[in-house]
Image (cartoon, grey):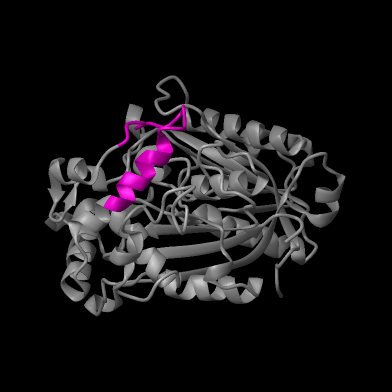
Amino acid sequence: MTIRGIAHIAGIFEHPGRELPNLTLAQIHAEVAEGALKDAGLTFGDVDAYYSAGDAPGFGALSMADYLGLDCINIDDTETGGSSYLVHVQHAAQAIAAGHIHVALITLAGNPRTGGASPGGSANVSGAPEQSFESLFGLAVPAGYALAAKRHMYEFGTTSEQLAEIKVAASNHAQHNPEAFLRDVVTIEEVLESPLISDPLHRLDCCVITDGGGALVVVSTEVARSLNRETVKVLGSGTAIKHSDAGRIDLTYTGAVKTGKAAFEEASLDPKDVDYVSIYDSFTITVLISLEDLGFCPKGHGGRFVSEGALCAKTGRLPFNTDGGGLCNNHPGNRGGMTKVIEAVRQLRGEAHPKVQVENCGVALAHGTGGSLALRMGSATLLLGREEV
């Protein structure tokens, strides 16, 4: 069953707050849900499906449906870390294609900056079978990504300067986002001069940690036609898992090698058709490897591809993360996949900041990575298009 053109993203909302000490997780979920539904021109009473992930409190979607007063016939608590919300869009589109639902609400909330659960895993990570073999011996999140970066450098000659290009592009975009956590434009030299966190990654190679959240509303064609607003079509999707394979792991690629291929095939498109990309950017190395695996450049050529401002809006060959991304704007609860979809929709609707809006943006790709590049991950890719695409 294909989902091409069957489901539409009708509403989006990103919480403007980056530090929310006076809001509970449930309240953040409620605020972003209300914002996305208002953006779509719908109400809580229109929702017949609700999706959340490991960031939802209590019994997850069950508790939140009760809290939000939803009369749902379908709920989904799929947890793949930061990519969960792209997986949810695929699941919502599949349910719509099967005729089971018409309006799906997807929410994210996190508050690690003001005392909530710290980033780096799901609520059940302490009972994971790998726990006694990994975390107890000091494999922190940045260290895992540093391993992937170091191996990529060894295999392909990638440099720290090339990784820094990704942060520079993100900062150039964030300066135009009044809600971005970091708005200062930085240089390659400033990235390399920032403190070393885990060799070869510096502090400015790492994402921000913020409170906040976001929400999406995915609807059927019938509902989309009834709304007084431009919606965005889901053209293709792909999801995949890559894990450590009992230690037989290649650190130089991600699950995007499968998800990108699947999404492009379903959409009958290829990388040259994409006008804008939202790439999960937990660290700069995440972006570089993902661009290779999604087919925007050959394996090992990512460093050369991102050099000389290639990712900058208006001047680069492939504008990315025009809100500043997780590196500069917002990364609530270590779950940046939601905001990747939100900014892709903004670009397609022509609602990004004028300084970073891609001219005639017709096709956008959003990609999420959950888990860790060095261990196990859930990857998800969405191809989205304007109604006329």
Query: For this view, does 361 lie left or right of residue 282?
Result: right
Q: Position of residue 73 (x, y in %)?
A: 74, 51
* Camera sees residue 283: no
Instruction: Name the quadrant containing residue 12.
Output: top right
Q: Position of residue 23 (x, y in %)?
A: 47, 23
Query: For this view, does 295 lie left or right of residue 107?
Result: left
Q: What segment carries the magenta color?
A: 165-185
Q: Is residue 170 magenta-colored?
A: yes
Q: Which residue is drawn at 34% across and 75% down?
A: 299
Q: Which residue is drawn at 57% across and 70% down?
A: 263
Residue nearest the viewer, comparing 74 with 279? 279
Q: Is residue 3 magenta-colored?
A: no
Q: Position of residue 373 (x, y in %)?
A: 31, 63
Instruction: Name the quadrant containing residue 71.
Output: top right
Quarter placement of the C terminus? bottom right
Q: As displayed, is residue 175 above or below residue 377?
A: above
Count all numbered tags in the image, as a single digit.
0
Residue nearest the viewer, comparing 230 with 314? 314
Q: As displayed, is residue 290 above or below residue 123?
A: below
Quarter placement of the N terminus? bottom right
Instruction: Name the quadrant containing residue 115.
Output: top left
* Camera sees residue 284: yes
Q: Position of residue 32 (x, y in %)?
A: 58, 34
Farthest residue to the front: give it: 315
Q: Residue at x 75, y 45 (%)?
A: 230
Farthest residue to the top: give it: 22
Q: As displayed, is residue 239 above or below residue 312?
A: below
Residue nearest the viewer, comparing 213 with 298? 298
